[in-house]
Image (cartoon, helix red, strand yellow):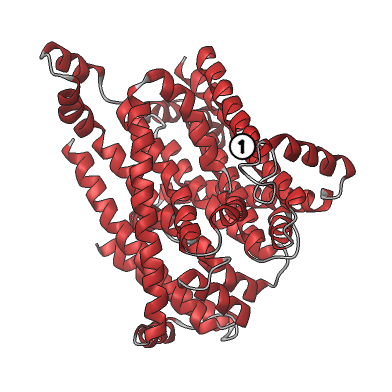
Amino acid sequence: MRNGVFLVVGMLLVWQALFMFAGAHALSPPIETAMFLGHLLGTAPFWGHLLETARAFSVALALSVVFGLGIGLPFGLNKMAAEVAEPLLVSAYAVPKIVLYPIVLLIFGIGLPAKIAFGAIHGVIPVAIFAMAGVRQVSPVLLRTARALRLSRTETLRRIVWPAALPEIFSGLRIGFSLTLIGTLLGEMFGSQKGLGYLLMNAIGLQNVPVIMAVTLLLVLFAATLSIVLLAMDRRLRRAS
Amino acid sequence: MHRAGLYRLLVLAALLATIEGLCRSGIVTPFTMPAPSIVVRDLGRILWTGSMAAAIAKTLHDVAIAVALSVVAGMVLGVAIHRLRGLRDALEPLFATYYAIPVYAFYPLFIVLFGLGSTPQVLIGFMLAMIAMVMNTLAGLDRVPRVLLRTARAYRLGPLETARRITLPCAAPFLVTGVKLAVSYAFIGVVGAEFIMSRDGLGYEINFAYNNFDNAIMYPLILLILLLSTGLNMALHTWERILLIRRGR
């Protein structure tokens, strides 16, 4: 907790120093940015953009989780399937997925579905990789115990595999969460007329520094807060297991 | 392992054949996606005529600078932070949440600060790559057995000798993992930034081709990026495994 406070104070100081160094044409100082963000949050059009992003992000996240687990869990259970799939997934993770965006747009057209698809493309891979690794790492002793106790396959999955793999699966969800957010925002930055990503891109075009800073601040606050909460849950799960 | 590799090739081949079939039969129109064989042919032609040589060179150059900077800075910072317990505790929450922050959101600021040259793109690649290197340096240093460090002290090895004979070999697999991630992240950062807003580079050319509905350039370049990033990733992955096997012996 104390460390967190130090870190936040330190970053605010760096921010203020950067402002003094670079000037108002490049960035706005912390207090002004926060106040401008407060002002934006009081206007109706801004909420329209915010809700649009929230809608796209939540659907994309749901898709990432469903498809990620749908790929990761069954593949993890089969040794050969996992060995075949893992390098493919890891390579896909390393690809700069932004270059796939034109393909997504050509398939889905401009609008909400393209954003959702692009967010899900980012999120699904880490969820699948971690779920697969989690299931593969379940200790053989536990599985032998399950066999000795003559647990049925569903019973084994429910009582042994799922709880044993849960910490790893949750880490995947945590990383999938942040990547889905980045993917959704990137999706909004091109070929979109609504959402925070669009707002950012528009502000870049207009050199509207206060808007750029305020939206960036909001995104960083949102991402960092949720990520800290998820990380705390992640650590608790790992300690418990 | 060999069988898995064979199956993997079969899966990829089947996937390509399916796409090829969908495109050839007209279910997927060439306006959406040209057949993979045509994309490969177009890529061959682009590489042969050298029409994209400048863009390719620019992107690879920027990625190389971002990787070099982030690996050096990441290792130096990693060693320093490893020494300073208090600083490490203070930075821990930053490391934990770093990759949740949409780094591209800072890109507009960098453009305002540094102009539209290569600097903002290299900086985005650097920002993404450097933290991975720091975290892996820390992980590597954490895994150096205490006994070995005490042995080094008993033999009165100097700091340089200790680093060369003990710390580096012990931490090497983690450092290579760090380099591998740094390369991936630098690639993602540079190409992504080029795509968002820039005047040259592969990301820019893809975006330009897209805006002109020029699939004969866009798809081959996308394929080129896929090949480059997976190729680099696989090469470094092999190196990493060799080191791990050697260490296990």
Outermost residue, right side: B49
Name the quadrant of the N terminus of chain A: bottom left
In depth, the one of B15 and A65 nearer the eye is: B15
Count of numbered badges drawn on the protein: 1
Whether residue A10 can be seen here = no
Name above or below for residue A200 compared with residue B58. Answer: below
Write down the chain letter for disc 1.
B
Query: SS at mark 1?
Result: helix
Name above or below for residue A6 compared with residue B140. Answer: below
Residue that carries the numbered disc 1 in the rendered image:
B22
The amino acid type found where label 1 is placed reads Leu
Give the residue drawn at x 43%, y 81%: A30
Name above or below for residue A59 compared with residue A49. Answer: above
Residue A109 appears at what percent x and percent y? 56, 60
Side (left or right) of B105 relative to B121: left
Q: Quadrant for residue A147, please give it.
A: top left
Whether residue B200 can be seen here = yes
Q: Residues within 10 Å of mark 1 (few under 14, many from 20)?
A: some
